[in-house]
Amino acid sequence: MCGIAGIVTQEPNQEAKYRQAIHKMTDAIKHRGPDAEGIWNNQNVFLGHRRLSIIDLSESGNQPFLSHDGRYILIYNGELYNYRELKIELQGAQHGSKHLPYFFKTDTDTEVILAAYIRWGKECLNYFNGMFAFSIWDNLEQKLLIARDRMGIKPLYYYFKNNTLFFASEIRALMQSGLIDKKLNQTSVAEYIQYSTVHSPNTILQNVFMLMPAHAMEWHQNELNIFEYWNCNKFAKSLKDLSYKETCQRVNELLTASVERRLVADVPFGAFLSGGIDSSAIVGLMSKVSQEKVRTFNVSFDEGEFSEAKYAKQIAQRFNTEHHEIKLTPNDFLKQLPEALEAIDHPSGDGANSYIVSKATKEAGITMALSGLGGDELFAGYDIFKRFYELEKKSWINVIPAKGLLGKALALKKNSVQGDKTSEILNLSTINGLNAYPINRKLFNQKDFTSILTYKIDDNQFIYQLIKNSQTDQQHILSRVSLYEIKTYMQNVLLRDADQMSMASALEVRVPFLDYQLVQFVLSVPDEYKYPSSPKKLLIDSLGDLLPGEVVDRPKMGFVLPWKNWLKHELKHFCEKNIEEFSERSLVNKQAITDLWARFLANDSKVTWSRVWHLVVLNNWINQHGVEE
């Protein structure tokens, strides 16, 4: 796990300028890789790397990594979980081809990626199981390949202008180069206001893009060719008729294998353990396949009736783990909030928790941790799955006379955010999951959103463009919702926050639920198996008696933090300062922003803390990085 940065240019006689820039870029991401730094360049190509050593800790694994003949140069961020199997294959000749055995000089997965590219070219991407973002420069053909993993676990940002391509693991590296425009993207600002994030491939900055998951990019003769090498949409259909018992057995096999693959490391590792079903399942399977005692980490902010610590302790005792309960008071959290905000690479309204948990885990001596992220998205763990399943089954609602009036009456009666969303859905000309899903993820109703901006924009377009090709048959409605969740909230909030906040403390986070083979299979499972009576029933049944009933049957919980009170008291001055500054920006209506803050302070039920906090975060980020409007 590391950080990468690169520049490829056709601008002549500028080696000194770009060499200085690549050093600035790698310095900006040194937190991602404190163990080693490397730079390789010729007159037109500049590749930088910061290393966090996980596999083969020797200097032979440092990067940029060169092929035996010096033709290929690789920089790589991530982990390749099937590198041992691929290494065996690459050590032999390929039958019926000109490919000779590759002789490895290290025990790293880094060299396996390079050897695979030398043998198979860009087709090597179809062989990889892991999380990664990497770049390979071909010195002979003067060609660059950049690729990102199937599920979008590792990030890759790029900027292409004036005959020069910049790319890096974090936006801050691009900005620190001093050679790109740091200007807000007007459309992205609107998207962030409405969804508390910007969906890839766009970012908050003009001309800075994110390479999409399961995509690769080739640069040759100053032309970019971006292509997709895998698409999860096509797996949302039944592969063959399996009984429920056979389906559960297959899920168990795939998840167990995924966990086992992710235990390969030459550094101390552990697991986040909240005490919920997902993290408990990961810990249980780790204990089953690991030859070492598993270390578990539970960060507790609350010791009252809503604390999850007692459930985490039950799981730790059940599997005899080396358990670490890290108790933090709200004041502890507040003290660390400034550095959490400093760690944010791309604006996010929901990343501070991840930073605190990651930092506490790293300080306990752990360099790699497994997480239960992705379980809800795959196994229908959110309420939205049930709501949208019922919505798709109720097509008759489209023929109700005056359904829009019914929606407005309901909104007035509920006087809540959910009431507004229900009203907006009932006002759709055609009500179905595809049209209703963007409304579900919105922060503001149409009236409030329109009043905030000084320009007009369709607030449904952002998510709609991502999910419009994710349609399935009527036996896989829940898989359709999984695709919606994966492409929006999971990839553009959860995974981005997990990466930027864990790597701020040089902690690698691995996510077994997002093994692509498991994802493919679960998407193929029909609705009748996935949600026969309760959320995540398929996952629970697949685990057998691995988890105790107290954990399986308890209500879904999360961190209970007093954000509302903080924003009104301890953080009030900080928030008011940023809200006031943000209201003065030309992209927003000053009166609407100040009214929003006043409504929050007055306990308006439609203005929760999250509807103002992400604006505070955005303004703070703009100031921190000197970004122009």
Image: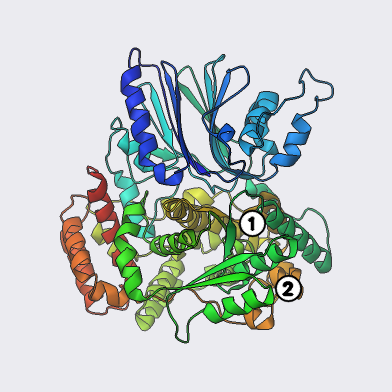
Mark 2 — residue? 546
Q: Quadrant of residue 116?
A: top right
Task: Pick the residue in front: 601 or 96.
Answer: 96
Spot occupied by residue 118 in the image (x, y as percentages of width and height):
66, 24
Decide: marks 2, 1 in contact (CB < 8 A)?
Answer: no
Task: Pick the residue in front: 117 or 629.
Answer: 117
Mark 1 — residue? 512
Spot occupied by residue 468 in the image (x, y as percentages of width and height):
54, 50
Task: Pick the residue in front: 580 or 64.
Answer: 64
| 94 to 322, vertically: above or below | above
Residue sticking out furthest to the bottom: 305
Residue 503's mark? none
Classed neighbour count for the residue bearing mark 2: other residues with Cα under 10 Å, few (<14), some (14–19), many (≥20): some
For residue 430, say whether it is visible: yes
Residue sticking out furthest to the front: 58
Q: Quadrant of residue 85?
A: top right
- Label 2 or label 1, whichever comes before in sequence order: 1
The three-letter code of the residue at mark 2 reads Leu
Q: Residue at x 74, y 55 (%)?
A: 257
Instruction: Identify the secondary structure beneath mark 1.
Output: helix
For residue 481, say whether it is visible: no
Left or right: where 479 falls relative to 4 = right
The three-letter code of the residue at mark 1 reads Pro
Spot occupied by residue 414 in the image (x, y as percentages of width and height):
38, 81
